[in-house]
Amino acid sequence: MGMVFRSRDYGSEEIACSLARRVTDDHPLALRSSTSSQVIPDSDVSFDDPLRANTADPSESMNWQNNCSTFKNRCSSEADNLLKKEWILLKGSLTQKFTSSNTIAVSQISDMIARNNRGDKSLADIHLEEQDYLETSLEEEKIEISRKEYFLRLQELKGEINLAWRSEDRIRALKFSIKVARLLMDTSVLQFYPTLFTLVVDVMDMFGTLVWERIKKRAEYANDGTLLRCLPEDFISDDICSEAKETCYNWFCKIGSIHELVPRIYLELAILRCWRFLDNNFTSILQRLVMMMRGIADPLASAYCHLYLANSARFLYSGDDVGYLIMSLRHLSILLRRIILDKEAVGRHFSKNKRVLISLMEPSIEWIMKCIFSLGYQNTRNILEEFGVARDLSVSSWKFPCVSLVLHYLLKLLPADVISDKAVEIIDFVEQNKDISVESHLVYRRVGHKLCESRLSLNSSCAVMNRIMQVLVQYNNLYEYLMIADAHLDIILLYSLNNYLSIMLDGILKRSHQDKVDEIELDILQSILVKIINHLDRLEDLLALEHFMTILDRLYGNWRNTVYVNILHKGIRAGCIGNPCTIQFLFEVSQVLHESIDISNMNDENKQKADLISKFVGMVNFGADLERHLSFLCDSRAAFGNIEEVKSILVHSSNNLGIKFFRDKPKFLSFLKSCLAFNDVTLPSVSDRIRRMNLYLESAEIALFGGLISHSEGFIISVISCLQCLDMAEGSGIPIDEDQICSLTCKVCSLLLILPVYAGNHEDRSMYLVQDVITTFRCQSLVSPRTKVQIFCAIISLSASLSQKELLYHAINTEVVSNAQLFFGDLSFYQELSSIANLAIQILDDVIRQEPNSATQGRLALDICNCLLISYTRSQELFLKCSSLIDIAKECLHTRDKYLQSTMSLFSRLPSNLEG
């Protein structure tokens, strides 16, 4: 007779398998006392908080001041190390930023680098030669020399200094160092001067190190080489012996006897830290050097001399005494002012291009200002007055107008809260001190950025913006207007100063119509629009903002796309999108973004656009107007058909629409059919097979929900057709996700349980869909034996389920008649189910033999055995079949395997009379 399906009572089985439950009086996660069942009140609960650990250690309290001192020293050391790194970067940037031609025309002064002057001469003879060179340098012709040759000759001089020093000929080493320092007197080639400076100061630093090490050695060792003591890093002059002090003083005397000012200053700066052997107070020394530099008439040479002073003074540990640096800036400001006003002769080659000269002097201003703040300057709130920014603008502590370049870098490094305290005064000060050293809009932009970093009061922000609006009116150039507006926009948005925002946008619109918008202006315009978009809470507020849409039309290309991405992101953040105007606007925005997507290159940018468009389509909601929503889905399919994710969302949205108002049955069925027709047209274009099959099954469920059995059957047939095409994709290189295939097939079987088998025109009531599934996977070569076992076990379970009087679940729609109601007790139907199950068992016998892995084969045998034990009534045939499967498992698995043991336990429950 064969094996017989087991009758199931699902209700009794559920009760038997459910865990015992009991009522509880309190929450199971509430805290309980260890001795009682009552919940402990929160006030009585104590926790071990590691952040509140007892740290009242007397030894720690005693060392508190020492720790603070150590921390302060460490911070100072870290600041010094940072300046060292930045100094290296600065020298590299000077060489790269200011480039000249490969051939350099040098004067007679620089030509000394090529002279072979190796004879022993006294310092007096050297002085006479130097004076002769000075008198004739302006009269003789320039000498052409290549950059490479210049560098090589300078390296030769550096080598000569080292060689002379090792030979104990220190006068000769000094002489060559003087020759190198004299090169910085020649500023005839402006663009080459910064590079020349970096080369020369490297030699100066080397010479300074040689002198420092010699004096330090004299302080630590006796004449016979005996170590006297090791000087600590923070030594003072009292720690130095008289012999070392005398040697140090002699070096300063030698350098002080140099006739020319520039070499004398550079050589003293090279050994500047040696003053630590002689003195403990360096303020007067630094001030003297700054005063000496006033004698350098050439503004470029003077600027870089001050730059070298600011770097060399770091080694004197002068703390926060930065008076000499402020003196340097004052002197450089005088030189810059003269260049700007062109009232005094500053050199024949300078008058032609003031801006080039100012740009060459700019690194000196920036570095000196950086040193002022890096050295721990404490009086930052009064430093504005040091530079002439006083409340009474008619009175300046500098006795002359401030230079914009100095003010620009002062504002760059000042703390934001200091600037915010005197914001209006600073804006007025900038207004009264405009010059060509820095474009005034850049200074205003710097003020705006600093103010955005601070926290202004509402009254202060209004006062600041009132002054800025007065400033903006003066700028007719769109670029300059945008630079200032963009820097101060955050203040307007933060404090909701909408009247200023309207005025600013109106000013942008007027100036954008006057000029052609170039790329730099488009960058700033994009920044402004994005800030406004991100600030506003609702997209409707953005659309209602005056001039916004008109300015947006001025953008194009990537600038417009970036703004559109932000707009679309803002639109979907609100969740459901129901305003028709907003929907239409975002739809047009999405169309523009869709056209910019390169489907062949789905990089991060294109993926972001596609993701935003997909989310927008899914969030649209027309409320009760279902027809309009379905029409929107049709328009979206036409507009965004290249985006794979959009197609999936369209089908999801269509299915959601189909069941939205199912209570109104006549209207519901008609509209549901329209939605399913939309799905039927859309789904074939979904390229991903797994996604397409999942959407087919989702649509089949929706059709069953509405009682549309033929529609549901059609979608299931489409799924089976997709499964049948797996073999056709063998050469495509697309991997098959077997877990997904198995899951989909099992879901098909679960739907076939409630789908009436009389669906369609199959009057013979055959299980043709199940048979199609069997046919599909019986010959499927790309699916592994493990997957086939799961699928055919699902078919056996489906057959056993369909044989029951009461099915495990049924369709929600009562119009869908259960298969149990139709066929229970029908012998031919039962025989067909048995035939399908037997065929599946035969196929499983073949499949299990195909598995090459022994352990996997054993587990597959146990899967089949468990399926049969659950599906069939205990019988002799079942016993024999399961025995053979367990024997296979025993051969392949360890006897202690838990899966094997549990299966044998279930098998042992068969009646004993079946074993004979």
Image (cartoon, rainbow, N blue to C red):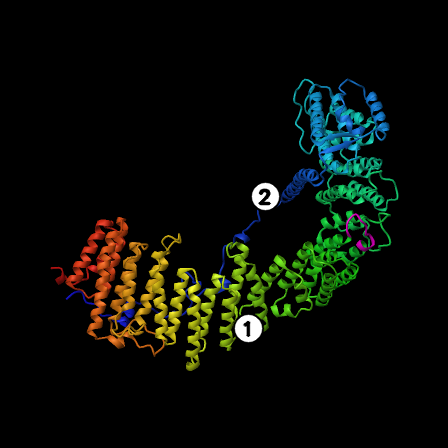
Residue drawn where x is 66% and y is 20% of the image: 226
Residue 125 appears in the figure: yes
Determine the residue located farthest toward the left in the rendered image.
Answer: 916
- Which quadrant of the structure image shows residue 23? bottom left
Mark 1: secondary structure: loop
| Amino acid under disc 2 | Ser
Q: Which one is closest to the eye, mark 2 or mark 1? A: 1
On the rendered image, what quadrant is the C terminus found in?
bottom left
Q: Residues within 10 Å of mark 2 (few under 14, many from 20)?
A: few
For the record, the magenta segment spans 430-439
Question: Closer to the camera, 493 or 198?
Answer: 198
x then y, percent, for residue 52: 55, 53
The answer to whether 804 is drawn above or below residue 911 in the figure is: below
Question: Closer to the camera, 445 or 400?
Answer: 445
Which one is earlier in the sequence, the residue at label 2 or at label 1? 2
The answer to whether 77 is drawn above or below residue 607 in the figure is: above
Residue 622 marker: none
Cα distance between the residues tagged 2 and 1: 68 Å
Q: From the viewer's perspective, is 751 left or right of 912?
A: right
| Amino acid under disc 1 | Gly
x then y, percent, for residue 799: 25, 67
Q: From the viewer's perspective, is 87 left or right of 861?
A: right
The answer to whether 689 is drawn above or below residue 853 in the figure is: below
Residue 578 marker: 1
- Which quadrant of the structure image shows residue 28? bottom left
- Which quadrant of the structure image shows residue 352? top right
Determine the residue located farthest toward the right in the rendered image.
Answer: 343
Reading the image, the residue beneath label 2 is 59
Mark 2: secondary structure: helix
The answer to whether 331 is drawn above or below residue 775 in the figure is: above
x then y, percent, for residue 144: 76, 30
Q: Residues within 10 Å of mark 1 (few under 14, many from 20)?
A: few
